[in-house]
Image (tube, rainbow, N blue to C red):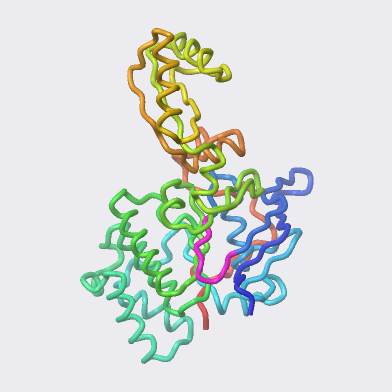
Amino acid sequence: MTDVLVLAEGLRKDFGPPRRRVRVLDGVDLALHRGEVLALLGPNGAGKTTTVRILTTLLRPDGGRATVAGHDVVRDAARVRSVISLTGQQVALDLKQTARENLTMMGRLAHLPRRVVRDRVDGLLDAFDLTGVADRLAAACSGGTRRRLDLAAGLLTRPQVLFLDEPTTGLDPRSRQAVWETVRDVVAAGTSLFLTTQYLEEADRLADRVALVDGGRVAAEGTPAQLKRQVGEASVELDLATTADAARVRAALGLPAAEGAQVLAPTDGSLGHARGVLDVVAATGVVPTAWTVRQPTLDDAFLALTGHHTSRAGQAAGPPTDQPTDRPTDQPTDQPAKEVAA
């Protein structure tokens, strides 16, 4: 048996009327291996959610192919749904039911035997630290608690692959940390995870491999460490008082001209090289207002590979979505809020 659970080859997807078609996916190739966490990292509009919706059978691709656990997402959609669970950007809970009632309802919708549902609900409430709110209405729970409850609901059927689409969007830092801990526990229990995110730290902390997605394409793929090494081992970051000072320092260091009063000087990661950069700066007579030696980030890698950062101007404040406002004609309207295995 192959260890590739999710495979996408040349996925393409367009939206909109014939004369104004917008290509959202333009040949996406991806693979998720058994026991792995794969993160799709990119800004809003990159194609992350569209990719997930195709892989979970909620959209049909216009080109390419994809399989989940060996089942084609178009020809064998029902079999794909039987081995996956999807937790989307919006929490899929009945706010008028308690936490326990929500989990029980999900189990019954999946046609699990009553005893199995009862045992799994009790186990998930305990595993996700939800026992204390088991009989509290979902409407009275915090955003972080609702998200953990939503994740628990997605695991009732013990799926082979759990798809998480922007799982912590809109959560405060404490709730986000709690969800990350929950996700780690899920993966440790043996579930493979396909994650989309626009949070650099989320991908860095949770993913075994990261695919940088931009403009409907995979710009690069690798472990977080491999991607960050593409922009160097470390750099000296200098804050200067004026743009003229910054220009003078860049010229002395042989760096290309750029705007702003901050200078980023690449190094080979060694102490001697970093000291050499500072010696050159000192020789110019310019005194930085602050300086630090920093390690490369995934955002640095994204910038190096795409020419812009993961957070595009004007997109960070809005809800994540990568679909145009034109509703696709093939988008199903009768899908349940959460796909679970029977």
x then y, percent, for residue 2? 64, 75
Query: For residue 281, what is the image quadrant?
Result: top left
Residue reaching furthest to the left: 132
Identify the residue at image location x=47%, y=38%.
296
Indicate whether 161 appears above or below 277: below
Residue lying farthest to the right in this orientation: 19
- Residue at (39% x, 67% y) in the render: 150
Q: Nearer the viewer, residue 162 or 235?
A: 235
The answer to whether residue 296 is above or below residue 131 is above
Magenta-highlighted stretch: main secondary structure? strand
Q: Position of residue 236 (x, y in %)?
A: 43, 28
Question: In the image as oriented, which residue stretches furthest toward the front?
Answer: 272
168 with respect to 334 (left or right): left
Query: Height in image: 313 above or below 93?
Result: above
At x 47%, y 26%, the residue is 264
User: Is residue 83 shown in magenta?
Assistant: no
Span shown in magenta: 32-39
